[in-house]
Image: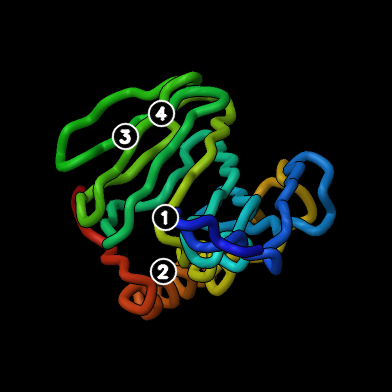
């Protein structure tokens, strides 16, 4: 495609196809058990030229990651349920229909303190977080497959692996958010 004179945009990259993902039915999507939650990689960095990744997260009661921070932006749109979000030491509730943006480098964590499931979409900019989830997660069959229960030894091994990989993925695991 030729560029019209005076257009500041680059030409359309015809090598990049349209991405259509259906988390409920698309057998090509990866479903991973991570920290007791089930994460589905809906759109990954390879599909967006590294610009972002979109992850569908199913968080059971008591679920959610430990306190952490990272050098990329992270946005959550809560589709179902309610999460408790701790951001820079302050706690807020975010229910269905709420969108929350976590600025890069800010300490945070989210937890499902309710009795029901929470479903949210997580957008990370730039992409890359999905690769850490691939390294630490365990493949599961579907978006709604519960994460397998881990023994104390498996939980410890997961924690050690996550801590060892954190710096590579621009993440710091914290004791307190």
How far is mark 2 from mark 4, CA to CA?
28 Å
Depth check: give the residue in front, 157 or 98. 98
- 91 left or right of 167? left
* Residue beneath disc 2: 159
Q: Which of disc 1 and disc 2 is earlier in sequence?
A: 1
Depth check: give the residue in front, 152 or 96. 96
- Seen as rendered, the residue at the extreme left is 89
How far is mark 3 from mark 2, CA to CA?
21 Å
Residue at left 60%, top 44%? 56
Neighbours of disc 1 within 10 Å: few (<14), some (14-19), many (20+): few
* Residue beneath disc 3: 85
- Vertical order, 31 against 146 (above or below): below
Neighbours of disc 4 within 10 Å: few (<14), some (14-19), many (20+): some
Q: Which of disc 4 and disc 3 is earlier in sequence?
A: 3
Residue at left 47%, top 57%? 5
Whether the residues at callouts 3 and 4 have beta carbons within 8 Å, the answer is: no
Whether the residues at callouts 4 and 1 have beta carbons within 8 Å, the answer is: no
Depth check: give the residue in front, 31 or 22. 22
């Amino acid at each position: 495609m030729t560029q019209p004179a005076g257009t500041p945009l680059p030409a359309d990259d015809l090598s990049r196809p349209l991405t259509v993902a259906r988390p409920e039915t698309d057998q090509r999507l990866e479903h991973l058990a991570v920290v007791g939650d089930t994460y589905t990689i809906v759109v990954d960095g390879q599909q967006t030229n590294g610009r972002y990744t979109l992850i569908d997260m199913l968080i059971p009661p008591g679920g959610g990651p430990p306190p952490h921070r990272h050098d990329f932006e992270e946005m959550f749109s809560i589709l179902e349920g309610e999460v408790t979000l701790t951001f820079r030491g302050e706690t807020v509730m975010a229910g269905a229909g709420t969108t929350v943006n976590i600025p890069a480098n800010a300490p945070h964590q989210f937890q499902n303190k309710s009795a029901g499931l929470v479903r949210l979409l997580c957008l990370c900019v730039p992409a890359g977080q999905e690769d850490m989830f691939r390294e630490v997660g365990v493949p599961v069959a579907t978006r709604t497959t519960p994460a397998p229960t881990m023994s104390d030894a498996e939980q410890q091994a997961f924690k050690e692996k996550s801590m060892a990989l954190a710096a590579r993925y621009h993440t710091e695991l914290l004791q307190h958010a």
